[in-house]
Amino acid sequence: MSLNGRTVAVFALGGTIATTASPATGGVVPALSGKELLGGVPQLSALGVTLRIHDFRRVASASLTLSDLDALHAAIAAELDAETVDGVVVVQGTDTIEETAFHLDLLHQGDTPVVFTGAMRNPTLPGPDEPANLYAAVIAAAGPWLRDAGCVVVLGDEVHAARTVQKSHTLDTSAFTSPGAGPLGLVADRKVRLHQRLPHRTVLPGNTEAQTNARTVRVALHTVTVGDDGTVLDLPDGRCEGLVVAALGGGHVPE
Ligand code: ASP
C-alpha cells in the first residue's frame, strides 16, 4: 500500500538516538533536533509522508518526569484535534520507553496509533540503528495497520504493545521483547505484518481532578531480595503515602 499523502506528527524528546559526540565529556549528549534526526534518513522522503515535527524535550530519558509525560499526552491530543494526522511517532531514549509508552497508552483516546521509538546505538558508532528505527516507526504510524492499537514500541523492526514491552537488555540492539506475549508484528516491505490480533486496551477517563491530585502523592517501590530483613521498608515511613512491594515469585517475601 502507498503511504503517499499520509501525515505523521513526530515528537522528539532526546535520548541516545538524538546524541552527538561531546568533546567536553568524551561521551555523547542529546543534541539533535527532530528536523536534524529525520533529515538524516533520506529514504523517508521517498515514502511521500508529510512529517509535522515537534521538538518537545531534549533530554536523556531517565530525566523525563510524569509532568513531561502528561504534557506530551496533552500536546498529542491538541495536535490530533487541530490537524488531520494519520499517526504519531514519539522519539526518545530507550531507558524509559516502556514506562512512557505505557503511561501514554493509559491516557491516549481515539484510534490514531502512537508509535514510540529510539535507538540502542548512538549515531557516532558503526551501524547505528537510528535510521532504520525512525523509518520503521514512520511507516507503522502512517499506515492503517495499527489503528486502535493505542501506543506501541517499534525497534529492530518489531512492533510491541505498550502494555507488554520490556527493555530486556542494556546494550543489545534487539533489547525490546514482550515476554509471554511476543511482538504484535513486524515492519517489513514498507508495511506492518501483524502476527496477532490487537490487544484489548484499558484507557483511563479524561484528565480528572483525581489524576491531577495523584501526581502529588509519593509512592515508594521496594524490590525484595534474598536476605532482605525488611529494614529498608522503614525508610519510606512518614515520607510516602504508599508503598509497592515487588516481591519474589508469586508475591512471596522472607518470613
Ligand atoms: N541514555 C539513553 C536514554 O536516554 C539510552 C537510550 O536512549 O537508549 O534513555
Image (spheres, rainbow, N blue to C red):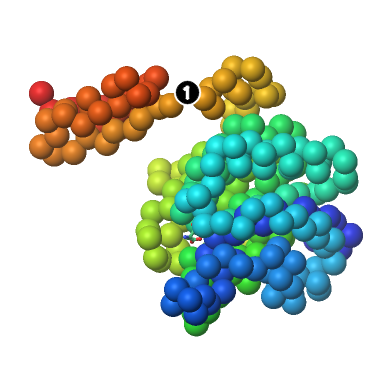
Horizontal side of residue 216 vs 244, given as left or right: right
* Residue depicted at x 64% and y 53%: 57
Q: Is residue 205 above or below residue 3?
A: above
Question: Which quadrant of the structure image shows residue 80?
Answer: top right
Q: Which residue does the numbered mark 1 point to in the structure image?
A: 217
Residue 105 at x, y percent in the picture:
61, 37
Q: What type is the residue that disc 1 sits on?
A: Val
The residue at 53%/77% (across/down) is 21
Image check: 249 left or right of 27? Answer: left
SS for dot 1: loop
Picture quadrant where residue 69 is located: top right
Residue 180 point in image, percent of width and height? 40, 43
Number of numbered discs: 1
Q: Would you place residue 148 above or below residue 59 in this image?
A: above
For residue 131, above or below residue 221: below
- Residue positioned 71% across, 32% down in the render: 109
User: Residue 128: percent from the left, percent from the top?
Assistant: 53, 75
- The image quadrant of residue 207 is top right
- Tell me if I can see residue 200 in this picture: yes
Where does the N terminus fall, quadrant-wise? bottom right
Q: Image check: 147 left or right of 104? A: right
Query: Left or right: 92 with respect to 27?
Result: right
Instruction: Residue 199: give x, y in percent of width and height.
Output: 58, 37
Residue sitting at the far front: 24
